[in-house]
Amino acid sequence: MLSEEEILAGIDRTARSVTSFYGDEEFVVVSILKGSFVFASDLVRRIPNRIELSFVGVSSYRDGTESGPLEWTLFPTEDEFAGRRVLLVDDILDTGRTLSAVRSELLEQGARDVHSCVFLDKPARRAVEFRADFVGFEIDDVYVVGYGLDWAGRYRNLPYLATFSPEADPSRP
Ligand code: PRP
């Protein structure tokens, strides 16, 4: 769906928008594990601002491609974000439940403000109201893997983005 070159060009654009939004301000980039690790890694290297990097882990129990209840796998340490400007980074904005929950939690913990930057936005799938401040690419409601996105834990290491049909995977669980 997207070649490595197309992805990196999109990230250049996104990083420029983030940089001009924050100006000289320092902020904390919070990568939501696991899916965002590839995107976050390429994004932060294109942001010249003074930033800190942090990680939280949230997983939605997925039955194949459908999302289920959320579980924190790495919870922020107390006061980690108190008074800080936070940029949440995720690989995909799908139903919106993950980013919405993480944003609420960080605001509750005293973050000064929380914005969000996603590699992919799938607006057709939204179940809760959530709008990302920075979006790399908007895509239709198709299942995709690669560049951090998985199916059953696999394919995150593909350097490109590919559409995927679970039925076509001969090694599926
Ligand atoms: C995926 C993805 C996002 C979230 C988006 O994570 O990385 O964090 O789902 O979906 P939502 O908008 O419907 O909440 P997943 O729970 O699959 O965990 P992972 O990042 O470890 O793959």
Image (cartoon, rainbow, N blue to C red):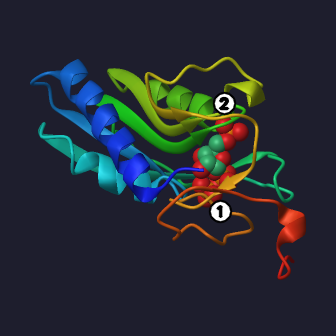
Q: Nearer the viewer, mark 1 or mark 2?
A: 1
Check the image and report above or below for 169 versus 51. below
Give, as a three-letter code, the residue at label 2.
Gly
**Within 8 Å: ligand 1 and the Cβ of disc 2?**
yes
Quote the CA–CA distance across marks 1 and 2: 18 Å
Residue underneath mark 1: 150
Tell me which numbered mark, 1 or 2, is placed earlier along the sequence: 2
Instruction: Tell me residue 57's x, y (percent).
Output: 54, 54
Residue 130 seen by the camera: yes
* Residue neighbourhood size for the residue with mark 1, other residues' Cα within 10 Å, grouped as few (<14), some (14–19), many (≥20): some
Q: Which residue is mark 2?
A: 96
Q: Residue at x 90, y 66 (%)?
A: 167
Residue 40's place in the image compared with 83, above or below, is: below
The residue positioned farthest toward the bottom in the image shown: 171
User: Under 8 Å from ligand 1: the CB of mark 1?
Assistant: yes
* Residue at x 86%, y 57% (from the top left corner): 63
Seen in the picture, residue 126 relative to 162 is either above or below; the reply is above
Work out which quarter of the rendered image holds the C terminus and state it: bottom right
